[in-house]
């Protein structure tokens, strides 16, 4: 069975809410998906999943530094 991981950076909490919503929707669609802050993710986490979604606020048209 396919698995997923949503990785996010959120300073104010809004991106965290969206990341959790996406992870919940993926799980409901039959793809068990974890949701982790970029600071919690280890390189091995990336190798264990089939789908990765990355979420970040934008600052001056670019992803936040912890994601970029």
Image: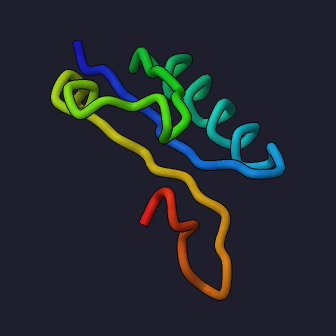
Apparent side of residue 39 relative to residue 1 in the rendered image (left or right): right
Quadrant, the C terminus: bottom left
Q: With respect to residue 2, does 22 lie above or below?
A: below
Q: Position of residue 9 (x, y in %)?
A: 60, 49
Q: Position of residue 49 (x, y in %)?
A: 24, 26
Apparent side of residue 2 relative to residue 7 in the rendered image (left or right): left
Q: With respect to residue 67, does 53 lie above or below?
A: above
Residue at the (70%, 40%) spot, across then down: 16
Residue at the (80%, 43%) spot, across then down: 13
Which residue is at the far bottom?
Answer: 60
Q: With respect to residue 56, does 4 lie above or below?
A: above
Quadrant, the N terminus: top left
Nearer to me, 52 or 36 = 36
Number of marks in picture:
0
Apparent side of residue 5 relative to residue 19 in the rendered image (left or right): left
Q: Position of residue 58 (x, y in %)?
A: 65, 73
Q: Position of residue 19 (x, y in %)?
A: 62, 39
Nearer to me, 56 or 4 = 56
């Amino acid at each position: 069975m396919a698995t997923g991981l949503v990785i996010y950076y959120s300073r104010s909490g809004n991106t965290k809410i969206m990341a959790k919503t996406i992870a919940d929707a993926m799980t409901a669609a039959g793809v068990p998906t974890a949701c982790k802050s970029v600071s919690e993710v280890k390189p091995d986490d990336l190798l264990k999943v089939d789908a990765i979604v990355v979420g970040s606020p934008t600052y001056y048209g670019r992803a936040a530094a912890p994601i970029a």
